Amino acid sequence: MLAAPSSLVAPHSTLATAHWPARDALRTRFRCDRRREPRWLVPGTATLLALGQDMGVLAELTRLDGSPWWLGGDSTTSIAPGTRVSVGFSDPNGRPATATVERCEGMGQGRWRIAVRFDGGAFM
């Protein structure tokens, strides 16, 4: 079995890491407040299906905005932060994914703003 070149092996690790010159800059960006990062409008709606202890709770998100790692939207149903969810989209080109609810903030009048963070391998 061939060993990975030493330039590809992370310190104190037995796993090979792909060469990616901008990795350090990207890590720094990940530590920032992502709510200030660029987002874009996402057409249609998304449906969150709670998994685990709250299995079966459904929340439909409208007024969607997204980023590569996050999705946010308004809902009439609240879901507790930390809840793992399955995400489906009304857009037939949208790919289902799994995510974790990171925020669920009340907006008044029975509405919540929910933000989910997609799982690392959700779109692989």
Image: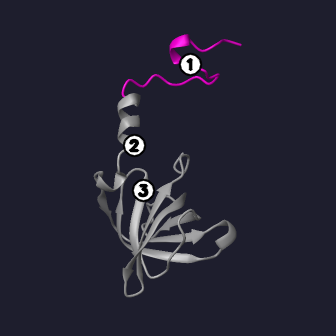
Q: Name the residue under label 2.
A: 31
Compared with 81, 8 (above or below) is above
Q: In this view, does 50 lie above or below 6?
A: below
Q: Separation of disc 1 and disc 2 at Cα?
A: 23 Å
Kind of residue at badge 3: Trp
Q: Is mark 1 on a helix, strand or loop?
A: loop
Other-residue count near label 1 (Cα within 10 Å), few / some / many at <14 / 14–19 / ≥20: some
Q: Indicate whether 1 appears above or below 83.
A: above
Q: Distance between the residues labelled 2 and 3?
A: 14 Å
Quarter-wise, where is residue 84 in the image? bottom right
- As drawn, the residue found furthest toward the right would be 1
Considering only order in the chain, which callout, 3 or 2, is on the residue closer to the N terminus?
A: 2
Mark 2 residue type: Arg
Task: Tell me the quarter of the picture where residue 20 sits.
Answer: top left
Secondary element at tag 3: strand
Q: Which class describes the residues within 10 Å of circle 2: few (<14), some (14-19), or many (20+)?
A: few
Q: What residue is rendered at 60% in x and 21% in y?
A: 12
Give percent across and percent down for residue 14. 65, 22
Which mark is on residue 9? 1
Neighbour tally class for label 3: few under 14, some 14-19, many 20 plus, Cα within 10 Å: some
Residue tagged by mark 3?
Answer: 70
Contact check, label 1 and label 3, Cβ < 8 Å? no
Which SS class for mark 2?
loop
